Image (spheres, rainbow, N blue to C red):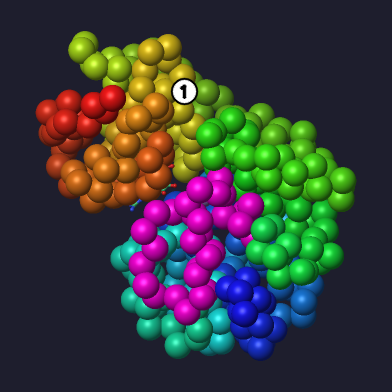
């Protein structure tokens, strides 16, 4: 049997199912989780999405979002659901640590069978059935392809389609990254045919900025942008005080690092943010620049070749100093 068929069988055999995704939800983790949620509801399962922390507001409109149980707000309930699940479906992450240190032990000790559907490199060995395809643009696309391979595409409807569209859209920078393939567009065509209103999803995600968010981004780009003198590298740093000044809400800096990468001639863009006594770092690149190697070697992180993240316990200044010192090592040789 194929992995796709095995996953279908495991789902058929289970009554109680938990869907888990990574910390700091994004469009793909929410989209793929809720696509799977609506599908399994339709199949009559007792299913709950259990996430480490709540999604930013620009993702709250999606149907089913209100049913997500998050560890940060309801740790006992989240632990109970993980423990009770006969099947735990892990979406859009490749190792248990990505759910955060608080929730990780509960995920690891969950007695149910585990499935992974993901597109990050180097999956850890903690699931019985694994679909790991780093070349695919989003986990949402993988869910569509799994349904298709399992012969269950007839279950797809507009509600599930909206979730899949969201994940594919946000993980591809609105269908522009190299990870977009002919298959991506074939899927999009199908989603539109079954009633997905793509323009509404773009509006919900991109045209719902608060004034504070727009001002914070304006401040970041006009006052805090640094371009390294001898390298095509640019960064922005935001201190806790600066974030506070603009009443920072989760999601306010979403996409900011991509704007930095949009500067002509820039090959690597970095955003440093002082949050929860740590510095959270987002890396983006193009061409042959591999930010995942830099993130994993120096900032306890990882991710994709062109989009990675990490963190540092040093001060903001010291973290930036460290970055500036090591970045020349990551200039591609070709
Ligand atoms: P973002 O910059 O949007 O937070 O993260 C970009 C990508 O980097 C994510 O999709 C994820 O693959 C990866 N990533 C972000 N933070 C971390 C981290 O702390 N550890 C690891 N291993 N990967 C991360
Ligand atoms: Mn993803």
Would residue 56 be found to the left or right of residue 307 on screen?
right
Coordinates of residue 46 in the picture (x, y in percent): 68, 81
Q: Is residue 55 visible?
A: no
Coordinates of residue 175 in the picture (x, y in percent): 62, 34
Q: Is residue 79 visible?
A: yes
150 vs 143, nearest the viewer: 150
Q: Tag 1: Cα neighbours inside 10 Å, few (<14), some, or many (≥20)?
A: few
Residue at 39%, 75% in the rendered image = 126
Q: Is residue 157 magenta?
A: no
164 vs 181, nearest the viewer: 181
Q: Which residue is mark 1?
A: 259
Secondary structure beneath label 1: helix
Residue at 54%, 40% in the rendered image = 179
Q: Quadrant of residue 89?
A: bottom right
Coordinates of residue 235 in the picture (x, y in percent): 31, 24
Residue at 30%, 33% in the rendered image = 272
Coordinates of residue 12 in the picture (x, y in percent): 69, 84
Q: Is residue 137 magenta?
A: yes
Quick one: quadrant of the C terminus?
A: top left
Residue at 50%, 86% in the rendered image = 112
Query: With respect to residue 83, does 322 lie above or below?
Result: above
Would residue 331 be found to the left or right of residue 59 on screen?
left
Quick one: quadrant of the N terminus?
A: bottom right
Q: Quadrant of residue 186?
A: top right
Query: With respect to residue 81, does 32 lie above or below?
Result: above
Would residue 65 be found to the left or right of residue 224 on screen?
right
Query: With respect to residue 182, does 227 lie above or below?
Result: above
Magenta segment: 115-143
Would residue 166 be found to the left or right of residue 44 on screen?
left
């Amino acid at each position: 049997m194929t992995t796709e068929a095995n996953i279908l069988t495991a789902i058929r055999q289970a009554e109680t199912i938990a869907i888990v995704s990574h910390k700091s939800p994004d469009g793909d983790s929410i989209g793929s989780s809720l696509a799977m949620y609506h599908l399994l509801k339709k199949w009559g399962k007792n299913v709950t999405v259990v996430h480490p922390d709540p999604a930013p507001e620009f993702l709250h409109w999606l149907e089913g979002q209100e049913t997500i149980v998050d560890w940060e707000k309801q740790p006992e309930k989240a632990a109970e659901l993980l423990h009770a699940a006969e099947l735990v479906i892990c979406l859009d992450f490749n190792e248990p640590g990505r759910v955060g240190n608080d929730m990780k032990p509960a995920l690891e000790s969950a007695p149910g069978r585990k499935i992974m559907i993901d597109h990050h490199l180097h999956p850890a060995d903690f699931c019985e059935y694994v679909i790991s395809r780093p070349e695919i643009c989003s986990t949402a696309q993988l869910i569509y392809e799994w349904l298709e391979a399992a012969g269950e595409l007839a279950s797809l409807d507009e509600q599930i389609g909206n979730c899949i569209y969201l994940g594919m859209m946000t993980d591809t920078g609105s269908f522009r990254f190299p990870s977009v393939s002919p298959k991506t567009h074939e899927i999009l065509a199908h989603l539109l045919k079954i009633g997905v209103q793509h323009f509404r999803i773009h509006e919900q995600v991109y045209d719902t900025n608060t004034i504070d968010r727009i001002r914070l981004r304006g401040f970041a780009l006009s006052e805090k942008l640094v371009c390294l003198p001898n390298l095509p590298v640019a960064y922005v740093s935001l201190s806790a005080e600066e974030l506070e000044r603009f009443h920072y809400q989760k999601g306010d800096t979403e996409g900011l690092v991509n704007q930095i990468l949009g500067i002509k001639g820039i090959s690597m863009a970095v955003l440093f943010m002082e949050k929860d006594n740590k510095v959270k770092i987002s890396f983006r690149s193009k061409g042959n620049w591999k930010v995942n190697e830099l993130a994993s070697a120096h900032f306890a992180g990882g991710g994709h070749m062109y989009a990675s993240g990490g963190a540092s316990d040093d001060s903001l200044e010291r973290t930036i100093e460290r970055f500036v010192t090591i970045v020349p090592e990551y200039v591609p040789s070709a």
